[in-house]
Amino acid sequence: MTVARSILLFLLAALAEIGGAWLVWQCWRENRGLLWIAAGVIALGFYGFVATFQPDQNFGRILAAYGGVFVAGSLAWGMVVDKFRPDRYDVIGAAICLVGVAVIMYAPRSGQQ
C-alpha cells in the first residue's frame, strides 16, 4: 500500500507541476491572460505541498526520484495536451528515468535512511 500511495502522490505532483507550468506558458507565450498565470501559480503552490505526504522522510531522495516522474510526465502531457509525438529517444529516455525512480524510491534498504 505504501508504494501505491507513493506512486499516486508522484502522479499528483506531476499533474500539479506540469499543469501549473503549462498554464504559465499559456499566459506568457500564447497571450491567454493573467487568470491563466494565476491558476498556474496556484497549481505550482499545490505541487510544493504534495511531496510532504510521501512516506519517505528524505527530501533529497523524494525530489531526485520525482525528477524522473517529471520527465516522463512532461512527455505524456505534451502528447495529450499539445499533440506532441515523442520519438524513440524520448521514450527510451523517459523509461530510463522511470527505472531510476523505482531504484531510488523502492529498492530494499538495510534499515539506514
Image (spheres, rainbow, N blue to C red):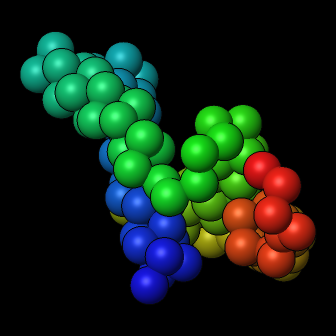
Residue 60 visible (yes or no) = yes
Q: Residue at x 82, y 77 (%)?
A: 108
Q: Residue at x 71, y 54 (%)?
A: 65
Question: Is residue 46 placed above or below 54 in the rendered structure?
Answer: above
Q: Quadrant of residue 52?
A: top left
Residue extending furthest toward the front: 111
Q: Is residue 1 left or right of residue 49?
A: right
Q: Is residue 113 left or right of residue 5?
A: right
Q: Is residue 85 left or right of residue 65?
A: left
Q: Residue at x 81, y 75 (%)?
A: 107
Question: Is residue 43 placed above or below 85 in the rendered structure?
Answer: above
Residue 57 picture location, percent across and down: 59, 45
Total numbered circles: 0
Front residue of 105/47: it is 105
Residue extending furthest toward the left: 35
Residue 67 picture location, percent across and down: 69, 48
Residue 71 visible (yes or no) = no
Residue 45 picture location, percent across and down: 31, 27
Q: Residue at x 71, y 64 (%)?
A: 105
Q: Quadrant of the N terminus?
A: bottom left
Question: Is residue 14 placed above or below 22 in the rendered structure?
Answer: below
Front residue of 4/29: it is 4
